[in-house]
Image (spheres, rainbow, N blue to C red):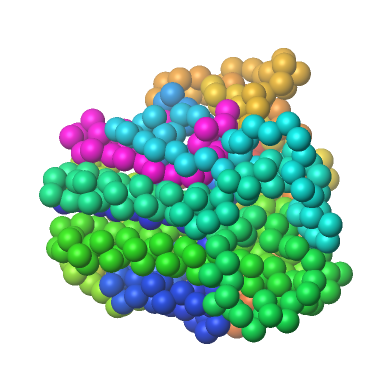
Amino acid sequence: MKAIVVMFDSLNRHFLPPYGCGWVHAPNFQRLAERTVKFERSYVCSMPCMPARRELHTARPNFLHRSWGPLEPFDDSVPEILRQHGVYTHLVSDHYHYWEDGGCTYHTRYSTWEFMRGQEGDPWIGQVADPVWPTNAAGRNASRDRMARQDLVNRQYMRLEHEMCQARTMAAGIDFIRRNHRSDRWMLHIETFDPHEPFYSDSKYKWLYAEHYRKYRGRMFDWPRYNFRGDDPPELVEHLRYEYASLVSMCDAWLGKVLDVMDELDMWKDTMLIVLTDHGFMLGEHECYAKIWMPFYEEVAHTPFFVWDPRSGRRGESRRALVQPALDTGPTLLELFDVPATPRMLGRPLAQTIADDTPVRPGALFGIHGGQVNVTDGRYVYMRAAVREDNQPLYQYTVMPTHMSRMFSVEELSRAQLAGPFDFTQGCPVLKIPAGRFFGTHPDLRRNLLYDLETDPHQEHAISDPAVENRMMGLMKDLMRQCEAPAEQYERLGLT
């Protein structure tokens, strides 16, 4: 057996034809749905990028114990476990966060890896002179901060499609497939940062939406800020959505090339294909752009997910079972290669769910460290806020004290104490470091919210139903206990 995992970043399911979108040009996602099982109730767990990737390795939630950071020395790693059991694992990616302080231990778990430079503000091309600044721009495009500057510098060297990060990444993945398709027992992880912002795509994908681009005379805007922009003019919001759609169409075209090579080499008979994302993205819904600073509405938390399993041969079908790809992908791969999962893994192998929609969990827990804790049973979504205005008590538990792109400060570490161990740390005590920040600025993060997705799929009106709220609180506490949530998390949320 072989496995190919294709991962996109910030892919909004509402922009995909298999999930009901009628205007985005993405025929290969529709083709994918015809060749795979499509999951209707797929949810995130830990937000955003590297917390989700820690879960892909460990198959257990990250956000209750720490924020963005590397794999820990005591963590299980699915790619490493596969490698130890004779499965060759290869990562090809343009996701530059893997090479920062807060992600530096992930790629080395694979047998081999490749990295394509240049996404977002990746410090890639060295140029002392300023680039040509846009004179009529909005959002992050109008900024002159370090990341915006570096992005403009990088774009100078990625003007043609074959020079762009996604194209180089997907082409390298296809090259691995062609070079190794006759061999057995390998897992390829192709991961592109697209359609993450900025929404930089080749012009031929923009012209799939020619009517919009012919008439648009507004500002350059393919990089929204993480904020509330209800006062933006409708034509600017519409343009941003077309910029995103153009990049989704580019993702679709390169996904199609992966499907083409699987067809050409007759790989469907012995190769699992998994296509997933870490989370969605908001493009004006709820008057919000981006992610993480607002409640995790459906546009962010409810994700697309597709799997082809050659053992059951199910295709063109939908599944209603509640799944969490960040947690379940690892155990699914282990089971494919007859490698046992560790007792610390909370994700579930999905072979039987793919075959006949067998449920694997009663609820899905999701959130970000220091934010609301959320739970869904597939119908209701319950968002639980901190009780106190200062969001306390809250700590991070780690022996790898790094944030996204820097180490913890001396001041932060001076307040650390030794704690634990937890069962999942395999006997290792960990640093317990005070974390004072309330994550996110949206006012609705400060209150509890309950939504009925059956009657209100767009989450336009929170409901009051004490019986349902109590049941969802009970489900939340049960799932938190399974995760070994620290005691203070219950206190912070008023769940004691």
Residue 372 x/y as whole percent: 67, 52
Q: Is residue 55 above or below residue 467?
A: above
* Magenta-colored stretch includes residue 89: yes
- Residue at coordinates 56% horizontally, 50% vertically from top-left? 158
What is the tally of numbered marks visible in this picture? 0
- Residue 288 location, quadrant: bottom right
Q: Is residue 319 above or below residue 166?
A: below
Q: Quadrant of the C terminus?
A: top right
Frontmost residue, 156 versus 206:
156
Frontmost residue, 381 versus 89:
89
- Residue at coordinates 79% horizontally, 55% vertically from top-left? 134
Residue 167 x/y as whole percent: 45, 54
Frontmost residue, 349 versus 387:
349
Q: Is residue 38 above or below residue 433?
A: below
- Residue 101 location, quadrant: top right
Task: Please indicate, yes or no, whether residue 114 appears anywhere in the rendered image.
Answer: yes
Task: Please indicate, yes or no, whether residue 493 appears anywhere in the rendered image.
Answer: no
Residue extent of the magenta highlight = 75-103
Q: Relative to residue 219, is residue 30 drawn left or right?
A: left
Residue 107 x/y as whole percent: 41, 34
- Residue at coordinates 39% horizontally, 38% vertically from top-left? 114
- Residue at coordinates 73% horizontally, 31% vertically from top-left? 128
Residue at the extreme right of the image, as rendered: 231
Residue 232 x/y as whole percent: 83, 69
* Magenta-colored stretch includes residue 39: no
